[in-house]
Every structure is written in C-alpha cells, then in structure tokens.
Image: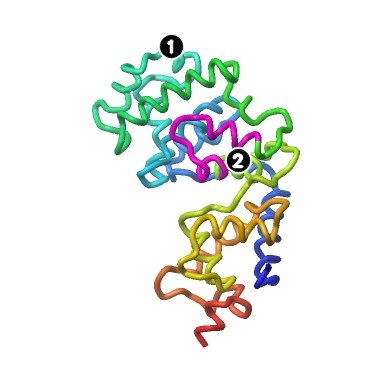
Amino acid sequence: MDTNPKATKYFLDEGERLLRSKMTHHTFSGNTDADKLVNNIENYPHAFVIACIMDRQIKAERAWIIPYKLKTRIGDFKFKTLSNLSEDEIKRYMTKPKDLHRYSAIMTHNCFTAIQRIRSQFKGDASNIWKGNLSSAEIVYRFLQFDGIGQKIATMATNILIRDFKVKVSDKYSVDISIDGLVPRVMKRVYGLSKKADSTELIFFARSINPEYPGILDIGAWHIGREWCKPKNPKCTNCPLADTCNFMISSI
C-alpha cells in the first residue's frame, strides 16, 4: 500500500527525468580518470564489471577506483591483456606496492574468475552480459553468477546500466531499490515505515508501489537523503517533501 502518493510521484518524476535524459557520466569514485574508465562501457565494459566485484567491505569510492589503479600498474586495461594474466600475476598487481583492497586475496581470485567467465561465457566482451534487449531478471542473474557479486550489487549494476547508460531492456521488473546508504533512511522516514524494517521489507514495499520498475525510486530518494534527510539534524523545513513526509509531520 502506498502510504505517501505525493512522495511517490516526486520520486517517479525524478527517476523519469533521468531516464529521458541523454547518457550520463556517473560519478563513482570522484577521481576523473578512474570514473572515465568505468563509464566507458563501449571500450572497457569489463572495467565496470570488475569495479562491481570490488565493491565489497570497503567504501564504494575506494572500490570503483581499483580498475584504474590496476590499469596504472599493469600498463593498460585491454581485455586481451587481462585475459593473459595468471591469478598470481593479478595478485601481484593487487598487492604491490600497496594493497588495493582490504581483502586483496579474495578479490584477486574473484577478479581472475570474472575474467575467465567473460572470456568463456561472453566471448571476451563483458557488454554481452547486458546486450540484446534482455529482461532485467536475466541481467541481474548474469551478474549474480560472478564470484563476489550479490543481489545488492547485481541490481545496482543493472539499474545504473538502464538509468545512466541507457542500456535497452525488455522490462525493469527485477531492478530493485538500493538497500543501504541514503535510500533506506529516506524511505523509512517519508513513508512512515518501521525503523527496524530490513532490506527485504524495503525491497517488497518498493515493488508494491511501483512494480514495473522499483529501482526508479532510487535517484529521488538519494537526492533527498543527500541534501536534506541527514541522519542527525535533518533539514526538514527546506525539503521538497516537508508537507507530506511522515517523519516531518510526526515531529511537529
């Protein structure tokens, strides 16, 4: 049940606006060169996939800069170059002169197996993971087959591909909302959900109010969270949802 139709309309309008816009350059790490590499899904789609794999147990900004740091250490980041590296060689690039990840040994293995999967299953071109007007479920499932990628990252990656990179899909049913960071806090406050609501509850709530594309709610909720809906001392009076937010109304 949609407990706040006005907020839902705001989130949908924000999402639709981004969907209708031209392909956008997504800021992943804040490093210009690193972001340029993972945004270049035409020439380096494997960089995007490897960054997704690295996005575990460390801040996202650190994870999404790793492909660029590997490129710097290796000399280039062409898939042919990567596919010729042994797991030990990848480990050396991951760890020397300094570890690129908190769990470099695990990430080395996951990176190596990802390269092998891209070569064998996707003909050496990672963009084949999402090309061909596939269903959103198929793309999420393909990401889930990579070691180290769970549901959260698989749906996030699919959402970025659809929303920001304009990848064509046959449906958007399986693209869920983000389940960490700013979005859950905003969803709980705006819709008056329990503070104890877990990720499963949030996912199904979003599906219930916009089943055709739950993940479209993300960008609007994220923007509210970044600008106004702070964990402490939220700027409620300036928020565009102030007159309809359950958190704001209950605080009066």
Residue at 70 percent across and 49 percent down: it is: 19
Where residue 51 sits in the image (x, y, percent)? 46, 35
Q: How is the image coloured?
A: rainbow
Q: Say what amino acid the circle numbered 1 marks.
A: Asn
Sequence-wise first label, 2 or 1: 1
Q: Residues within 10 Å of mark 1 (few under 14, many from 20)?
A: few
Q: Nearer the viewer, residue 185 or 51?
A: 185
- Residue on which the image places disc 1: 84
In the image, which disc is placed on residue 158?
A: 2
Asked whether 138 or 219 is in front, the reply is 138
Label the magenta part by its dominant secondary structure: helix
Boundaries of the magenta span = 138-155
Viewer can see residue 195: yes
User: Which residue appears at 65% of the width and 72% of the height?
Assistant: 3
Q: Is residue 5 above or below residue 111?
A: below
The amino acid on which the numbered mark 2 sits, given as a three-letter code, is Thr
| Residue 180 percent across, percent down from the top left | 47, 55
Q: Position of residue 213 (x, y in %)?
A: 69, 51
Res. 24 image quadrant: top right
Does the image show residue 33?
A: no
* Looking at the image, residue 231 lies above or below residue 183: below
Question: Regarding mark 2 in the picture, which secondary structure is present there?
Answer: helix
Q: Residue at x 35, y 18 (%)?
A: 87
Name of the residue lying farthest toward the top: 84
Q: Is residue 149 magenta?
A: yes
